[in-house]
Amino acid sequence: MGEPSWVRRLVAGLGVAVLVFLCLPIVIVVPMSFSSASSLEFPPPGLSLRWYEAFFGDPRWLEAAGTSLALAALASSLALLLGTIAAYGLVRGRFRGRPLVELNFMAPLILPQIITGVALYIFFARIGLLGSFAGLVIGHTVLAVPYTVLVMTVAIRAFDRDIERAALSLGAAWPVMAWRVLVPNLMPSAAAAWIFAFIISFDEVIVTIFLAGAHETIPKRMFNELVLQVNPTITAIATLLIGISVVTVLAVTTLARRAGLLTKIAD
Amino acid sequence: MATIQLRPGPSGVGFVLPLGLVMLLAFNVPVVLMLAWGFTSPKGVLVPWIDMVERTVYLRVLVNTFRIALIATATCAILGYPLAYWLCCLRGRARMIGLALVVLPFWVSILVRTYAWIVGLGNNGVVNRSLLGLGFVDEPLAILYNELGVIIGTTNVLLPFLVLPLFAAMVRIDRRLLMAAAGLGAGPWTVFRRVFLPLTLPALAAGSILVFILTLGFFITPAILGGGRVPMIANMIDMLINRLPRWELAAALSTVLLVATFVCYALYLRIGRAAQPS
């Protein structure tokens, strides 16, 4: 728009200021994690790796990391498997109440997590799953389902149905067609959906606090330590988590681009 | 085609069944049971509800939560609109970098971002040290472990939820509409006020409602940045379950939160539909 140059400069200034505000947490945490001081002083008075040593030298943190990884891997795989099959039914199926079913699958995303946490806490306390690893996996799967259903619905909708029809009319049984046509074509989207679900589970705090009992995950330990005191080891963990996030964003972007390419070829 | 009949059930409902069953057992039933808990007090069906209204502490927390959610939403809108507008004006690589800087924090866990504000907002933190150093204030501002800290943290965490859809709506606007308005003699300010702004209002409203819903149920940020002094609904529910054991009251408060969320979400869907050019 032909706005005067001072307006343009004002908008740019505001935009940059808000971007700085958005990224400030990351800009603060990463240098702090290399601090040599045990107080939270910024900028750090000297550099060291002591907080990384504190993390990797503490068996309790490492055990929490193991639990988090196993939990996220199981929950995201379950959510991907169930979510992909359901997404296929939602896109290709013709049955009554489809929008309602879809809304039901999205509900854990819309509902505040505290409600899911309390509901599962009361329910699991009754049926004896409270504090069990299986209960945690179920809770995290429910939270990851909206993301896998969402991503896979988009992917399947973008996939040309005529290719499925061609395989079937050439004599492939449905399972053979699914395995040799659908699975290879949907793989990049499925990988993106899995990573998405993995991160959701790996970062989850609220439902975990309610269900975990004696199990410790990284976010649960971080949260409990943060409420009590400020421990600089957490800056090291936070930086590692930010690193994982950056790698993940790059991976998902690459996968999404490949998925886009594949659907273009299919067209 | 006979082969298509090989699918489990011609309607495709069979595909939805496994997940549907899991969701029914591990989500729908627990949520319904929790709602029922609100009416199962041994002392009387409505006792938790009467408690909630009579004990002013619960009402105060409810009012407090809605107030904080409103302030955080307004702050997000005021900060998010210029950012989205500026990103929309950028071209090529600059726009990509700007968008990446909005998306990146979105992917970093809320816990990590909230934690950073403890470091940033404390008496010895970056913000206070900068303000002192520049001579804007004489003593450190109290911005941590109070309502202001919670609002700053919440705004920071939720800003991308508003900026991203707003940016998408701004990019979709047909530039020829703006040119037509300018060609008909409108000045830049009039073009913005009478053409651009109205076209982006539905997206702004939808994004704001989304931020509002998310703030209503916020738990981590008030727990950490409020230092226990800024209880919101979610923190209250946590306390009623884990410390006091008063499950029926927790269930009643959860019901209030659930209803508020659904009302806002219905509003969000309506406005979202209006925002989509059919």
Image: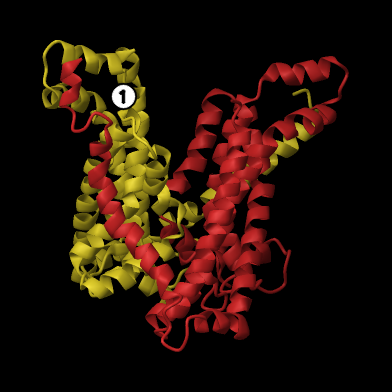
- Position of residue A105 in the picture relative to residue B199 (left or right): left
Q: Secondary structure at mark 1?
A: helix
- Position of residue A1 in the picture relative to residue A30 (left or right): right
Q: Can the viewer see residue A234?
A: no
Residue shown at the point (11%, 17%) measured from the top left = A172
Residue shown at the point (16%, 19%) measured from the top left = B3
| Quarter occupied by residue A149 | top left
Above or below — where is B210 with respect to B12? below
Output the chain of dot 1: A
The quadrant the C terminus of chain A occupies is top left
- Position of residue B44 in the picture relative to residue A124 (left or right): right
Above or below — where is B81 with respect to A188? below
| Residue that label 1 marks | A258
Give the residue type that dot 1 points to: Arg
Given residues A12 and A257, the one toward you in this image is: A257
Residue B242: x and y in percent read 38, 80
| Quarter occupied by residue B42 | bottom left
The quadrant the N terminus of chain A occupies is top right
Residue shown at the point (46%, 57%) measured from the top left = B113
Q: Which color scheme did the rendering employ for the protein?
A: by chain
Residue A116: x and y in percent read 38, 62
Residue A250: x and y in percent read 35, 36
What is the letter of the yellow chain? A
- Position of residue B203 in the picture relative to residue A34 (left or right): right
Chain B: colour as depicted: red
